[in-house]
Image: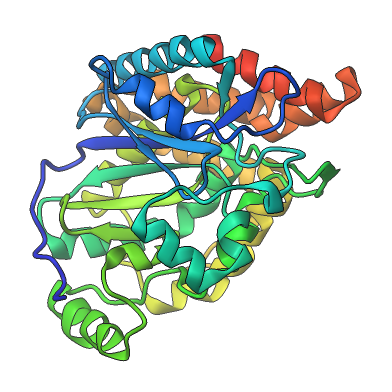
């Protein structure tokens, strides 16, 4: 089908999606509980939206459209509270974290939905291995060309969001030595990575999407698993690199850090993006996945090597006026605290060391999701 017309939306408006783990409170393993959870949640109004995900051990929740940090955070807390109440009735816990630390992909069940069945047929075992959990953030754009500009202008900041949100150090009972092992699973899909470097929507539609559609490889934008992708039906770009944080407070802070950064970039405070910026993209992405905040990145313009922590702190200072204008300065304070005290991957490793088991680590994640931190 033809590419959907880009529907302009309010500039810098936000929507947040969180993929969450459904955990048995008996053994702390993932539970195939999404059919029961969704049925229960349908019985009364939900403070956002909730949908199934590819396997029955996960669900996705989404906020309404927001422009302010305070209202976004308030709704995320309402969503969390509603989920916890429903989970208690089913003896199911909910939590963040980019991976469940010891679940076995072979035990997962594909949710009974035509698209998920199609994906499973195409990608085989990769589909069950896609029982991973991310935070997606939509940012409103006034038109399609500005969306593509913003998508590519953000390329050098992608490592910030990977490192700040990283919460997937363990896979199948083992420490991977990565801060975000989740993104390794995403990268296995052939249509992952980065979007093609095109800055005009007409070129994107004619020179890329239409040709890809003719090959039979794609049918819609849903078939692309890019780190950042345009969503024409919403009038947004969608950042997809974040692991789901352990708390909704952190999720709100990450979204509004992105909002302030987008305002700064749309004001043309930096040189325009160029194709050569992507020469260092995969290296920088790997550094953030592997080492988190202890990683380093190569600046795509100067080729200077910069510690990731230092680059985040410099950026927080640089966009402070934009954050003030948007009313999201508390979000930047939260980002500063992550840089100072460590990300969720570090927290999970610490909990594993103190509790002595992967089950104890999951219990910590469940408690963290309930608390306001």
Q: Quadrant of residue 318?
A: top left
Does residue 205 lie above or below 189 as drawn? below
Left or right placement of residue 150 versus residue 91 in this view? left
* The N terminus sits in image quarter: bottom left
Q: Residue at x 18, y 78 (%)?
A: 205
Q: Quadrant of residue 218?
A: bottom left
* The C terminus sits in image quarter: top right
Q: Residue at x 36, y 67 (%)?
A: 223
Q: Residue at x 42, y 11 (%)?
A: 81
Residue 95 shows in the view: yes
Does residue 168 lie above or below 270 as drawn? above
Give the percent coordinates (x, y) of residue 79: 36, 18
Q: Considering depth in this image, is 48 or 344 the residue closer to the camera?
A: 48
Give the percent coordinates (x, y) of residue 142: 10, 51
Does residue 199 lie above or below 329 as drawn? below
Counting labels gives 0
Give the percent coordinates (x, y) of residue 202: 12, 78
Q: Residue at x 8, y 52 (%)?
A: 8
């Amino acid at each position: 089908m033809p590419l959907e017309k880009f529907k302009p939306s309010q500039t810098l408006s936000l929507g947040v999606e969180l993929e969450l783990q459904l955990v048995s409170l008996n053994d702390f393993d993932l539970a195939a509980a999404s059919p029961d959870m969704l049925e229960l949640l349908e019985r009364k109004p939900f403070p956002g939206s909730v949908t199934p995900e590819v396997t029955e051990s996960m669900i996705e929740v989404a906020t309404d459209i927001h422009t302010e940090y305070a209202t976004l955070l308030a709704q995320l807390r309402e969503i969390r509270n509603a989920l916890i109440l429903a989970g208690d009735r089913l003896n199911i816990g909910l939590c963040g974290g980019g991976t469940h630390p010891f679940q076995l992909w072979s035990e997962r069940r594909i949710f009974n939905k035509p698209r998920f069945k199609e994906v499973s047929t195409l990608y085989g075992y990769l589909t069950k291995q896609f029982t991973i959990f991310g935070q997606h953030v939509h940012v409103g754009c006034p038109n399609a060309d500005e969306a593509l500009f913003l998508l590519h202008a953000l390329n050098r900041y992608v490592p910030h969001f990977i490192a700040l949100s990283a919460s997937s150090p363990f896979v199948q009972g083992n420490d991977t030595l990565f801060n975000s092992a989740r993104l390794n699973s995403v990268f296995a899909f052939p249509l992952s990575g980065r979007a093609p470097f095109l800055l005009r929507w007409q070129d994107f539609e004619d020179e890329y999407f239409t040709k890809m559609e003719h090959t039979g490889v794609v049918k819609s934008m849903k078939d692309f698993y890019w780190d950042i992708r345009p969503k024409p039906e919403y009038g947004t770009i969608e950042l997809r690199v974040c692991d789901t944080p352990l708390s909704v407070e952190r999720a709100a802070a990450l979204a509004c850090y992105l909002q302030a950064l987008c305002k700064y970039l749309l004001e043309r405070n930096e040189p325009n993006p160029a194709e050569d910026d992507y020469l260092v993209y995969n290296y920088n992405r790997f550094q953030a996945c592997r080492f988190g905040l202890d990683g380093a990145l190569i600046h795509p313009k100067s080729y200077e090597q910069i510690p990731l922590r230092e680059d985040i702190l410099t950026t927080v200072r640089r966009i402070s006026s934009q954050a003030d204008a948007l009313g999201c300065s508390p979000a930047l304070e939260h980002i500063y605290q992550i840089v100072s005290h460590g990300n969720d991957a570090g927290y999970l490793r610490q909990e594993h060391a103190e509790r002595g088991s992967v089950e104890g680590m999951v219990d910590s994640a469940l408690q963290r999701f309930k608390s306001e931190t």
